[in-house]
Image (spheres, grey):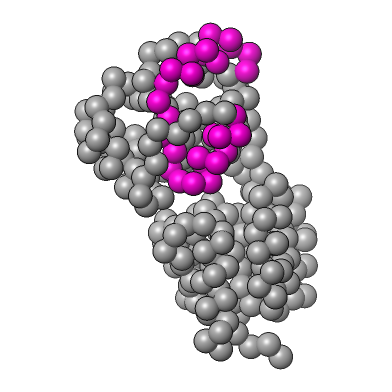
Amino acid sequence: MNVLVTREKSKAESLSRLIKKAGGNPIEVPLLTFEWIHDESRDVIIQNLNQFDWIFFTSGNGVHFFMKSIKRHSKATEALKSIHIAAVGKKTSKTLKQYNLTVDFEPSHYTAEVMGEEFAAYYTPKKVLLVRGSLSRDVLPDFFSQSNIPYESITVYATKANRKEQENLKKTLYAKRLDAITFTSPSMIQAFFSLGKEAIKEEHLKKSACICIGSTTESEAKKKGFTNLIVPDQYTTAHMIEKFIDYVKKGRVSHE
């Protein structure tokens, strides 16, 4: 049972471990790289961090690169101690805890849509800082604007296709029968097609199980032509694998 793991190298290990435990063979090909963004406009916001009473984080990468950004600003580090923090889900919350930061709000469902709606039902912020990546959707900015919630956003990292892995991906697609391909974001799917090109065959789109985290990832997978989709109710890698194991038990994967 070959499962293609497309997560970045630092996060692939935990998913591969789950796949092995389930009796599968993980094949790691990290499709994305993440780069810290540094610019003067972002520094101005960080230097005046005390104007915000809430900071929104929608990914673990956002946390890591934001903390890298404020390291050189002692006033910002001090101000952060008195600012409330919202995290989109458990993985992001766990990353924040690595920096000894307390999460004050986490939505019941790990999407930007639910995050905005549930937050507004309980809180009236003075001003929100939204920490983003270069490919983040505009769901929360649109929601804040429509709800008349004052906010600013900063982009702290860029998401790019991992060109170094292009030949490895093509080689894997040509040489291996893939029972499943895992994606945890729409940008991962876009990188798969950008890097895989002619090596992506009909069998990958129609026969391989496409295991996605999140409705936006599922939507992108459908748009790109995947038809054999598996989407867990809870957006975690553990639930991805649980869902796939159920799929295998129902006899939908050939083991010859």
> What residue is shown at x 70% (from left), y 75% (from top)?
23
Work out whether residue 11 or residue 166 is closer to the camera in this orientation and state it: 11
* Residue 240 appears in the picture as rendered: yes
Q: Which quadrant is the C terminus positioned in? A: bottom right
The part of the image, by quadrant, that contains residue 141 is top left
Q: Does the magenta segment cover residue 111?
A: no
Where residue 96 appears, as percent x and y from the top left, is: 54, 34
Outermost residue on the top side: it is 75
Q: Which residues are magenta?
A: 71-99
- Where does the N terminus fall, quadrant-wise? bottom right
Residue 102 horizontal/vertical position (percent): 48, 30
Q: How many marks?
A: 0
- Above-or-below relation of 22 to 193: below
Residue 95 lies in the magenta-colored region: yes
Q: Residue at x 24, y 27 (%)?
A: 124
Residue 40 visible in image = no
Q: Is residue 252 above or below residue 128?
A: below
Q: Residue at 54% x, 65% y: name it.
A: 240
Q: Position of residue 154 (x, y in %)?
A: 47, 26
Residue at 73 percent of width and 66 percent of height: 27
**Up/down of 78 relative to 151, above or below:** above
Counting from the top left corner in percent of width and height, residue 85 is at 43, 30
Name the residue nearer the viewer: 40 or 128. 128
Image position of 7 (left or right of 206) = right
Q: Quadrant of residue 152?
A: top left
